[in-house]
Image (tube, rainbow, N blue to C red):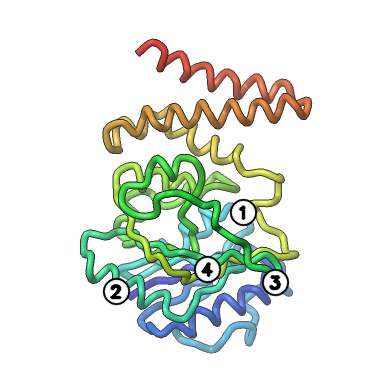
Amino acid sequence: MISVIIPVFNRLHLLQEAVSSVLEQDYEEFELIVVDDGSDMEFCPLQEGLLPDDPRIQILKLPHSGLPGLVRNRGASAARGEYLAFLDSDDLWLRGKLSAQLDLFRKNPEADLVHTREIWQRGHKIVSQKGMHHKHSGYIFPDALEKCIIGPSTVIVRREKFLALGGFREDLEIAEDYELWLRWTASLPVFYIDEPQVVKRAGVWEQLSEKYGQIEKFRIAGLVDLVEQEWFQCNALCGTQKQAEKELVRKCRIYANGAEKRGRHDEATAYVRIAEKYSMLHQQE
């Protein structure tokens, strides 16, 4: 069985469309866990009649946190399936997504994560992905370091492996997915379906990724903690710690330059210091 987890906050009409895209799958052996992050009462999916009457649907109500990793993890804790699938409430699945990914799992019993291509939709327009050149399958850690290249709404993972890795980091408001995929890809291969199975949507509604105008600061926050804990040295493939340190230096320098141009001198200095620390380590080798 697949446990499908949808986190939601005040997006009832989008949630209804996302839920419909799950119920319309051609694979039916799933449970659907909607995790409500403290929605206002008028948006709360707990209200009778707002979601389809389907025994496979359950709703978990949480106090509002605004932390998507925490919300997804609570859904994973309640899940009963061998596999976990995540769907953001403003995204949609195409009808054959679950069956296509399960077929790949069956053909590759060593697989722990299968993700897919997605369609990017902004309003009513499809966004081209021609400039996206990165590795999608196998050991993709160097590409995953640069930016998040695995969409949460595209993945199915083995629940056992997800829990063993600790799930999503719960204190990051943004880029919690980037941080998890770093830990995942640093030691494990991923499998990929090179056909769109998800519509990733953006529109007039609020999105966490756009709350601060940029997300690189949050990627750095996730990466710097792993680097300083020497997580990659102890828990990953040979060489990943050095790769992570070099990427951290690059990210911090770029961010510091941007902060300096905008007059945020103290912030720029803090990121320069991080970059200098790990630059010096590599110079001493």
Task: Residue under label 1, please give it.
Answer: 65
Residue 140 screen position, x and y as percent: 37, 47
Residue 6 is tagged as 4
Q: Secondary structure at mark 1?
A: loop
Tell which of 25 and 33 is nearer to you. 25
Residue at 46 percent across and 13 percent down: it is 280
Residue type, numbered disc 3: His
Tell me whether the residue at label 2 lies in contact with that at label 3, contact meaning CB atoms closer than 8 angstroms.
no
Q: Spatial distance from mark 4 to mark 1, Cα to Cα?
A: 15 Å
User: Residue 84's quadrant in the figure?
Assistant: bottom left
Task: Residue under label 2, please give it.
Answer: 103
Q: Spatial distance from mark 4 to mark 2, Cα to Cα?
A: 23 Å
Residue at 45 percent across and 40 percent down: it is 145
Residue 165 screen position, x and y as percent: 35, 48
Tell which of 70 and 140 is nearer to you. 140
Residue type, numbered disc 1: Ser
Q: Which residue of the protein is positioned furthest toward the right in this rendering?
A: 263
Task: Residue under label 3, please give it.
Answer: 124
Residue at 72 percent across and 64 percent down: it is 205
Mark closer to the observer (2, 3): 3
Residue type, numbered disc 4: Ile
